[in-house]
Structures are given as C-alpha cells and as structure tokens.
C-alpha cells in the first residue's frame, strides 16, 4: 500500500471545490497563542510550512511576526495562491513557495522553525513523515506539528456524515503518546505531544448536508462549546486537535 492516503488529483479537486479561500488571515488565527508563546522564547527568524497550501500559517508568521516564511507543498494552485496572498496584501516575493514531492525533494536550505498543520495524518507511515520534516530543520531548530483529532466526538461526526473524508486520514496517527515516542526515536529533544483546544466539530461537506443534519450538528457544536467553557478541559474525546512540539 502506498504511504500516501491522498494524491495530486485529490488535492487539485479539493482546492478547486473550495470557495472563500482568499481571506485576510487574522491575528487570532488557529494556534496563534501557541505560536506567540513559541516565538517569544526562541530566536526564530526563518520558517517553512510543509503541506500547507494555500499557506495560511506561512502568511500568519510573515504578517504578524515578520519571519522569513516559506511554503512547501506537493500541489500549488497558482490562481488560488495569488488571490490568498493579495487578500493579505502580500506578493509571492513575501512568501517563498516551493512545489515538490516531500519524498524526493532535497532541501537547499534549513529553517529555524519547521511546521505542518494537517499533513502527517494523510500518510500511513507516521514516523517516516515526521522524519521528512527534519531534513528542513536546522540543528537547534523547532518542530511544530498539528493534526486533527478524529478519535473522539469529531471523529464520530466524520464517520457518520463524511466517511470518504474520514478514510483519507490515518486515524492511528492521532495518538499523542505514539507521536511523542516517534519524535524521541528520531533523536528530538524537549518533546511535547498533547490534545489541544476545547470542543469543536466540522465537516468538509457541510454545505451538502440536509437541513436536519445541519441543525443537529449546530446543536451538538453549541452544546460542546458551552460544556467546555464551563469545564475547560482538553481531552481525547472533546479536543479537536493534537499538537506536537520538539527541538532538533
């Protein structure tokens, strides 16, 4: 079986099916608190986002922290990229873009920060895809990985209403203990891996759902939000994300 759970055609169709991609990335974008804390404690000047087209996190790091930011992806849809950069008052000179195969590309540069948000769960061999990040990372540099958590309530929603999307994810990778173990085996230090965020659910095909389903999911989302506001816990069943941090 191929290591990849998706291919170039999948991503071409995925991005061409999306609307409203060109928006100004806000200062409170997802994981902003983690990035602020991470960057405050380290001398980080360069960063590369792997598999992150259209590069919202690379744009975020450029706009709000002034980093020399790059984006690497297997598939880059140029018209979409141009629109997204323009919405953020940036040009392609502001965020360097590399289109290539992570399994064949030989990096010409190494970076202080290597990040991916929603990449590693699309591959069968989790340790191998983490290792691919390290070829971009400077000695002493920081690795930052996030992935969705489909092992709790959000996973039930995916299985129930979008099994096709669920099957594009390696659910066994969504295990903080396993992820931390792989990082340590790869020689990384100061390893942290944990569930992150209070309750949330989403569907890639939400617009195609009927009114009854949309109403149910909205009620479920609201119930979970209220519960985790009263009891702000982060857990396997409720948290929408998993975060991994480590140092080379």
Image (cartoon, rainbow, N blue to C red):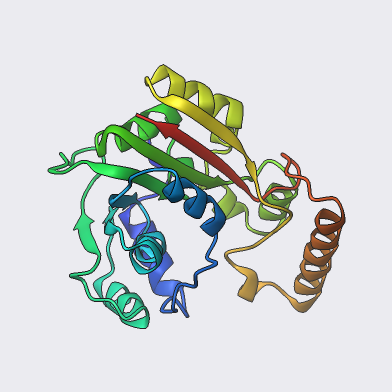
Residue situated furthest left in the rendering? 108
The reply to whether residue 1 is visible in this rendering is: no
The reply to whether residue 96 is visible in this rendering is: yes
Q: Nearer the viewer, residue 41 or 178?
A: 41
Q: Nearer the viewer, residue 248 or 36?
A: 36
Residue found at x 58% / y 38% = 171
Q: Going by the image, does 65 lie left or right of 108?
A: right
* Image quadrant assignment for residue 114: top left
Q: Residue 174, position in %: x, y?
A: 58, 37
Asked if residue 100 is positioned above or below residue 245 in the image, the reply reads below
Q: Going by the image, does 160 lie left or right of 29?
A: right
* Image quadrant assignment for residue 98: bottom left
Q: Residue 203, position in %: x, y?
A: 63, 63
The number of numbered badges drawn on the structure is 0
Q: Residue 127, position in %: x, y?
A: 42, 27
Q: Residue 110, position in %: x, y?
A: 21, 41
Asked if residue 78 is positioned above or below residue 48 in the image, the reply reads below
Asked if residue 65 is positioned above or below residue 184 in the image, the reply reads below
Image quadrant in which the C terminus is located: top left
Q: Nearer the viewer, residue 138 or 238?
A: 138
Residue found at x 38% / y 73% = 16
Q: Going by the image, does 175 lie left or right of 210?
A: left
Image quadrant in which the N terminus is located: top left
Residue found at x 73% / y 44% = 234
């Amino acid at each position: 079986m191929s290591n990849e759970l998706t291919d170039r055609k999948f991503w071409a169709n995925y991005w061409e099916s999306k609307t409203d991609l060109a928006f100004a990335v806000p200062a409170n974008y997802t994981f902003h608190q983690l990035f602020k804390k991470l960057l405050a404690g380290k001398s980080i000047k360069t960063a590369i986002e792997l598999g992150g087209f259209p590069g919202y996190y690379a744009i975020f790091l450029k706009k709000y922290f002034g980093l020399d930011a790059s984006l690497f992806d297997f598939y880059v849809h140029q018209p979409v990229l141009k629109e997204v950069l323009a919405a953020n008052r940036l040009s392609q000179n502001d965020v360097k873009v590399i289109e290539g195969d992570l399994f064949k590309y030989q990096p010409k540069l190494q970076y202080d920060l290597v990040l991916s948000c929603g990449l590693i769960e699309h591959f069968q061999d989790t340790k191998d895809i983490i290792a691919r990040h390290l070829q971009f990372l400077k000695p002493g540099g920081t690795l930052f990985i996030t992935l969705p958590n489909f092992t709790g309530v959000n996973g039930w929603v995916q299985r129930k209403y979008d099994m096709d999307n669920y099957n594009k994810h390696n659910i066994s990778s969504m295990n903080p203990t396993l992820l931390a173990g792989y990082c340590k085996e790869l020689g990384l230090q100061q390893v942290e891996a944990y569930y992150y965020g209070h309750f949330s659910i989403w569907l890639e095909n939400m617009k195609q759902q009927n009114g009854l389903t949309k109403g149910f999911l909205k009620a479920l989302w609201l119930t979970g939000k209220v519960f985790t506001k009263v009891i702000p816990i982060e857990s396997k069943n409720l948290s929408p994300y998993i975060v991994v941090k480590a140092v080379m």
